[in-house]
Image (cartoon, rainbow, N blue to C red):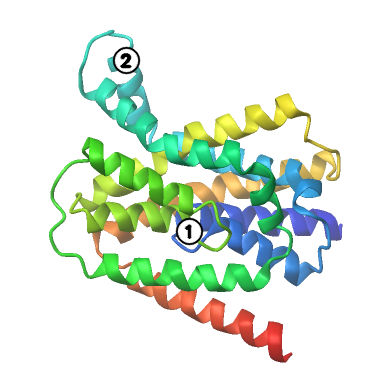
């Protein structure tokens, strides 16, 4: 029963923090730390990928109309809005894909209870959010150079504690991109990467049965439904320039973690 409860909590944490700019990877590591989970990153790979699959599906549900429109444009086999958007997504994926392939083993070690690293990277996330919240000119669409810079932000956000959505949305807003378009691009650009990572892990045979089927299902459902709610909420918050409150949250969590880690 405790393991099932833990899976639900992890699902809720993943669902909320995948879309809210506070680092899902960092919060998953902190949650495992709170639960006293001593498993290494590779040992919890199946649960981690399951939770990410749930939030990827939640993204597709929230943006189902956009996805349908993009697919219709793609199957017209001509250069149009959908093909351009898809090409921008592909361009934005390149930096993170290169980092993921070349430094996969190194990245895995960064997710092995590196609590201090998580806290420090949460501070970085908070600073990005604080700067983005002060941006005033946000009215342009995503361009080719923008896609590359946003992709670099996504690559850096592989580090636990740096929020992927926080980094990519903040970068977009600081580049002067419309806030709603920034959120839309940020959330859709991660779906192909998640699917690619799942395919790579399947081919590498890295999945191990450390979690039972009921735990995986419970975690998936918790992440999926909370993910939908968080995604819709985040779009509204970005449009209203409310990112600074998440910056304060990141600073607070980082401070608490460091105090507990070194003085408790």
Tell me how many marks there are. Answer: 2
* Nearer the observer, 104 or 233: 104
Q: Indicate whether 261 appears above or below 221.
A: below
Residue labelled with disc 1 = 163
Give the farthest residue toward the bottom.
263
The numbered mark at residue 219 is none
Q: Residue at x 78, y 29 (%)?
A: 205
Identified at 36% across, 66% down, the residue is 128
Q: Is residue 65 visible?
A: no
Q: Is residue 110 left or right of residue 90?
A: right
Residue 93 visible in the snapshot: yes
- Does residue 107 appear to the left or right of 36 in the view shown? left
The x and y percentages for residue 39 are 83, 57
Q: Are marks 1 and 2 in contact (CB under 8 Å)?
A: no
Is residue 206 placed above or below 78 in the rendered structure? below
Mark 1 or 2, closer to the camera: 1
Closer to us: 16 or 139: 139
Comparing 57 with 28, the one in front is 28
The image quadrant where one finds the C terminus is: bottom right
Q: CA distance from mark 1 to mark 2?
A: 30 Å
* Residue drawn where x is 74% and y is 28% of the image: 204
Q: Could you say where residue 133 lies in the image, as x and y percent from the top left?
A: 27, 68
Instruction: Indicate the position of residue 9 as horizontal and vertical percent values.
Output: 69, 59
**Quarter of the view holding residue 25:** bottom right
Question: Badge 2 is on which residue?
Answer: 74
């Amino acid at each position: 029963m405790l393991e099932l409860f833990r899976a639900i909590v992890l699902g809720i944490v993943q669902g909320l923090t995948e879309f809210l700019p506070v680092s899902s990877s960092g919060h998953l590591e902190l949650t495992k730390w709170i639960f006293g989970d001593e498993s290494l990153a590779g040992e919890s790979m199946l649960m981690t990928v399951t939770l990410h699959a749930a939030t990827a599906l939640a993204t597709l549900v929230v943006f189902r109309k956009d996805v349908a429109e993009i697919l219709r444009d793609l199957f017209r086999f001509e250069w149009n809005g959908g093909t351009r958007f898809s090409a921008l997504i592909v361009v934005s994926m390149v930096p993170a894909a290169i980092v993921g392939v070349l430094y996969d083993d190194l990245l895995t070690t960064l997710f092995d209870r590196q609590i201090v690293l998580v806290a420090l990277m949460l501070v970085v996330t908070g600073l990005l959010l604080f700067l983005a919240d002060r941006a005033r000119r946000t009215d342009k669409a995503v361009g080719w150079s923008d896609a590359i810079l946003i992709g670099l932000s996504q690559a850096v956000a592989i580090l636990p504690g740096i929020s992927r959505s926080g980094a990519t949305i903040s970068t977009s807003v600081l580049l002067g991109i419309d806030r709603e378009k920034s959120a839309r691009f940020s959330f859709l650009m991660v779906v192909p990467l998640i699917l690619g990572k799942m395919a790579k892990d399947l081919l590498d045979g890295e999945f191990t049965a450390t979690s039972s089927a009921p735990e995986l299902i419970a975690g998936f459902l918790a992440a999926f439904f909370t993910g939908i709610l968080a995604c819709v909420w985040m779009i509204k918050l970005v449009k209203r320039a409310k990112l600074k409150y998440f910056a304060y949250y990141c600073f607070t969590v980082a401070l608490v973690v460091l105090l507990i880690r070194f003085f408790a």
